[in-house]
Each structure stands twice: as structure tokens, then as C-alpha cells.
Amino acid sequence: MRHLDTNENKKRLCQIYNEISKELFGFGTTLLKATVEGDIVTLIAKHRRSPRSDAMEKESPGLKLEVDFRMSLLYKKKYREKLETDMDLPVEAVLRDYDSATQWAVTNVILRNSDRSDPSKHN
């Protein structure tokens, strides 16, 4: 697996994340930081509050939660696809948690690790 813990690679991870944010919501993040620890990439992001989102929360909080959940699923799918195609990364899982009250999101990307996926190496 290639070495991801470089400024250039972390910058690209953030660029892809922001591209998806702009595509889905019309604007990027206000703060975004990527860290790499072994085969786990973590992105911490502060998103902008959408006026439409505020209006929906006042009128239908349950619907807003459902939309946030569905958008998060879509975000994970698109981010995974871009990492696999644009950066040729072997993505095992994308995990994302988003707090709509504060607009913070944490995304963890677990990359396939040949040692971890080979059962004979766990003895």
C-alpha cells in the first residue's frame, strides 16, 4: 500500500472531501483536517449551516434527521468511489458521524490491509 501520510496526499484527501461537499450542498467546509495513522484516514470537518436546513429543522425536525442521515450515506458512497478511482486506494470501509447541531463531521476511512484480511496471519 502506498504511503499516504504526506502533505500532498492529505491535501488531495481534503480536496476530494470538499469537492463532494460542494457537489451535494453547494459549498465547502469552513475547517477540514486529515490525519493518517497506518491504514486509517481520519477527516475532521466543520460544515457550513444551510438556511434550507435551518428552515426544515423548524418545520419538520424528524424529516431533517432523515435527510441528514441519507445525505451522510450518499457522502460516504461518493467519497469511497472518489478515493478508489482518483487515488487508487483499497477502501475497506467509510465511517462517518455528523452532528447537525454543531455542523461537525468526523469521517474515518479504513483501508484494506493484506495482513489484517489474511486469516493465516492472526495466529
Image (cartoon, rainbow, N blue to C red):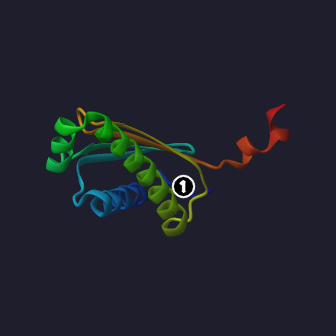
Q: Residue 87 or 50: which is nearer the viewer?
A: 50
Q: Quadrant of the image for the N terminus?
A: bottom right
Give the structural element (helix, strand or loop) at label 1.
loop
Q: Report the side of 79 relative to 100 (left or right).
A: right
x%, y% of residue 31? Answer: 24, 46
Residue occupying the point 34% across, 61% down: 15
Q: Residue lying at the far front in this picture: please name it.
A: 59
Q: Residue 4 or 118: which is nearer the viewer?
A: 118
Seen in the picture, residue 22 relative to 65 is either above or below; the reply is below
Q: Quadrant of the image for the C terminus?
A: top right
Q: Report the side of 70 relative to 117 (left or right).
A: left
x%, y% of residue 96? Answer: 44, 41
Residue occupying the point 23% across, 33% down: 102
Total labels: the figure holds 1
Residue occupying the point 38% across, 50% down: 71
Q: Residue lying at the far bottom in this picture: please name it.
A: 86
Within-10-Å neighbours for mark 1: few <14, some 14–19, many 20+: few
Quarter of the view holding residue 55: top left
**Residue that label 1 marks:** 3
Q: Residue 92 or 77: which is nearer the viewer?
A: 77
Quarter of the view holding residue 120: top right
x%, y% of residue 72? Answer: 40, 46
Disc 1 residue type (three-letter): His
Q: Report the side of 51 relative to 122 (left or right).
A: left
Residue occupying the point 40% across, 42% down: 69
x%, y% of residue 83? Answer: 50, 60
Seen in the picture, residue 85 relative to 121 is either above or below; the reply is below
